[in-house]
Image (cartoon, rainbow, N blue to C red):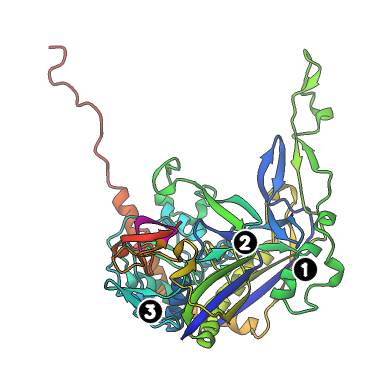
Amino acid sequence: MREVVIHLLMEALGPITHDSGTVGNESVIAQEPVDIGDGVVNVPKITGNAIRHCCVREPGGLWLRDFLGFRGDAKFATFLLSGGQPEKTEGENTLIVSEMYRLFPHFKLLGGSVKTIIKGQHDSWIGALVCEEKRRYFEHVLPKGVVPESRMKPAAFWTPSTPLQYNRTDQSNTGHIDKAVGSSEMMIWGGQYVMAGALFHTAFHLHRALDVDVGALLLALRGWQESGAVLGGKRRIGHGRMKASLYAPGVDTEKCIRAYVDHMHAVKQDATLWLAGHFVASVAGEQQPKVKKGRPAKQGAGA
Amino acid sequence: MTPLRVTVKLLNPIAGDDLPRLDALLLGEVIEMTNVPQIVRVGRDTPCPPAFEFPIPIEVAEIDGHRIARCSSPIGMTPKWEGIEYIHKRFAADAVDLIHPDCLGVVQTKRGYFKGERLPLRSRLIPEIAWFCVGDADPLLKILDRVKTIGKKRAHGNAVVESWSVEAVDNDQSWFTESPWGSVLMRELPHSPSLPADLCGHRLDIGACAPPYWHRARYIERVSPI
């Protein structure tokens, strides 16, 4: 068991719009405050929650679904895609923790809630924009030379001051003009974005990791890259596309992935039974015919 | 064991209302290092283990039968920025291919198990946090160097540690520090007659004085720094 840190550098191939809210009809991108000595400036970021979900939880979970061929109840879908929900339990069931860690390195990384709340064994870092303001951060988290000096430009360079603007549709082709008022009924929308060419960095810190755990993470990252490596919002109109590259010193990527796949082959039957035990039995219970509620019919009504 | 000041420098904002306590942080790491998480796993419904069952490189003293670490509460620099972040979660209704055909149907997302979340999380940019303690500097630094992130939502990349430093100080300020008004309280301690008569800078409340601080079995009447 060891501590492993896997770095991921992501170059934006299109506009990145990982939003945190709206002002009027303009969206505002997520930003983090950075102390630059004589003040604090806001710099675009991709939240750790989004990185964790899009790069690890979703692709890794979907690989498991395809590998095991397992379909469960709605709780299973929630568990696979967001870790489930805490439920009222009677104590901490360490047997569940131990079995889940043994059978599913993917779930061991992420944790979740299966009758008991189970801690994950990895930290996803924030997707930090490579920029001048974050120089101190990158000097600390990455060896010199990994981030090209040419990318160390002010954050404002990567976030154009003119927001993106879209209309709901091309008004000239639709005739959706309010004749009485003489103005369009279409709304302009858009907002801030990080331009293509910007570089983001994130990292995954695995605690007490075995090769199979590292393999689970790497396979998920590979799945994410193969599915287009998309992060952030407005994906349906081509935003958020990334070109990702791994920096994992001391990690044999292929060996770890092979170890994970071999492990899953070895425990396939047990893993399926474990899932069935937790996410199908509850369905059978829920689907019992329900007693019809409401006021009982009056006996002898109208007599 | 000598009086020390432990300082951590952070690279990005720390999440949560409370800053982390040094004794809890060390105990958590020591337990991780022993590789027996399932044995020492403690929940709200399970009995609380004796305080400091695993030794940490900080002196543990007894006050009124309670074992308390000789380390102060966290002292954070004035935040340079403060805000609220939101953690979202929702039921992925589009993921129907994960659900068995027999299980398809209406899912109640306005309440209950599948209810969506938008949880607010306090976030502060605090460049440095310090603790005063009595302990062994070298083993302390060895354990702390393993800690790469602190605070709440560590798994989401908050409060990445830039560096830890442990330096010797002249006076022990772990529980009290001298002032013209009397002994200023530096951490939560059990409310008892053995506290200094000239104690100041405190209030009376109910809570824990030893990790796990969130466990109700640890709750006692205590004095807390204001």
State the CA–CA distance, disc 1 to disc 2: 18 Å
Element under label 1?
A: helix
Secondary structure mostly seen in magenta is: strand
- Provide the chain ID for the residue under circle 1: A
Mark 1 belongs to which amino acid? Arg
Where residue B81 sits: x, y (%)? 65, 54
Element under label 3?
A: strand
Query: What residue do we see at 57% from left, 61% from top?
Result: A58
Element under label 2?
A: loop
Q: Which residues are magenta?
A: B200-208
Q: Which residue is mark 2?
A: B126
Label 1: few (<14), some (14–19) or many (≥20) C-alpha neighbours in 10 Å: some
Where residue A197 sits: x, y (%)? 83, 60
Q: Which residue is mark 1?
A: A135
Label 2: few (<14), some (14–19) or many (≥20) C-alpha neighbours in 10 Å: many
- Provide the chain ID for the residue under circle 3: B
Q: Is residue B94 visible?
A: yes
Answer with the quarter of the image where residue A34 lies: bottom right
Which corner quadrant holds the C terminus of chain A?
Answer: top left
**Numbered tag placed on residue B58 in the rendering:** none
The front one of A29 and B216 is B216
- Asked if the stretch drawn in magenta spans residue A23, the answer is no
